[in-house]
Structures are given as structure tokens and as C-alpha cells.
Amino acid sequence: MKTNTKLNQLLEQIAKQHLFIDTLETQSSDRLDFHDVSVWAVKAALQAAYEAGLKAAETNTTPIHTQS
């Protein structure tokens, strides 16, 4: 799978802002890799990702591909 830097940055920003998760990198520690989050925080994060996709589509930016 090809790494998409812009996508990773966006996902990290959403995770920090809505889920209070500092990194999406694997830390090889259950304490650091698994998080308790509220359903409303998950909903807010999903909505932020959806809105980012809409914005990207409206501005005709190059689509973010998640698979190579």
C-alpha cells in the first residue's frame, strides 16, 4: 500500500482534535495502541473526515487514494 502523507496528516489531526489520540503510529504497547473513546467523539471524528472529503471534492483537489 502506498503511503499518502496528506491523508495521514489529516487523519492524525482528526484523531488529535476529536479523539485525543496523539499518534496513529503503532506503539507496540496495548496501553498506547488501544484507547477508550466516547461514541460522540467517534461520531465527531467521522463527521470531520466526511466533511474533509466533501471539501476536497468541491475544490477539485486530487483525490486521496487509500490503496495502491
Image: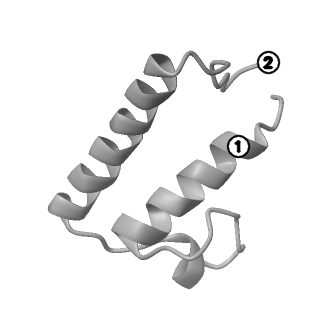
State the separation of the CA atoms marked 2 and 1.
15 Å
Q: 50 above or below 17?
A: above
Mark 2 or mark 1: name the one nearer the start of the chain: 1
Q: 53 above or below 20?
A: above
Q: Is residue 45 left or right of residue 61?
A: left
Give the number of the mark in front: 2 or 1.
1
Quadrant holding the C terminus:
top right
Residue reaching furthest bottom?
Answer: 31
Dot 1, how many residues are within 10 Å of its Cα: few (below 14), some (14-19), or many (20+)?
few
Q: Mark 2 is on which residue type? A: Ser
Q: Which residue is mark 1?
A: 6
Tell me what residue is drawn at x 57 percent, y 50 percent: 10
Tell me what residue is drawn at x 65 percent, y 79 percent: 29
> Which type of secondary structure does the marked residue at label 1 adopt?
helix
Residue reaching furthest right?
Answer: 2
Quadrant holding the N terminus:
top right
Tell me what residue is drawn at x 33 percent, y 53 percent: 45
Residue reaching furthest front?
Answer: 59
Q: Is residue 3 left or right of residue 41?
A: right
Residue 3 in percent (x, y) is at 81, 38
The label on residue 50 is: none
Tell me what residue is drawn at x 62 percent, y 62 percent: 24
Task: Count the marks.
Answer: 2
Q: 64 above or below 46?
A: above
Q: Mark 1 is on which residue type? A: Lys
Quarter location, residue 32: bottom right
Closer to us: 50 or 56? 56
Residue 36 in percent (x, y) is at 32, 74
The label on residue 68 is: 2
Quarter location, residue 4: top right
Dot 2, how many residues are within 10 Å of its Cα: few (below 14), some (14-19), or many (20+)?
few
> Which type of secondary structure does the marked residue at label 2 adopt?
loop
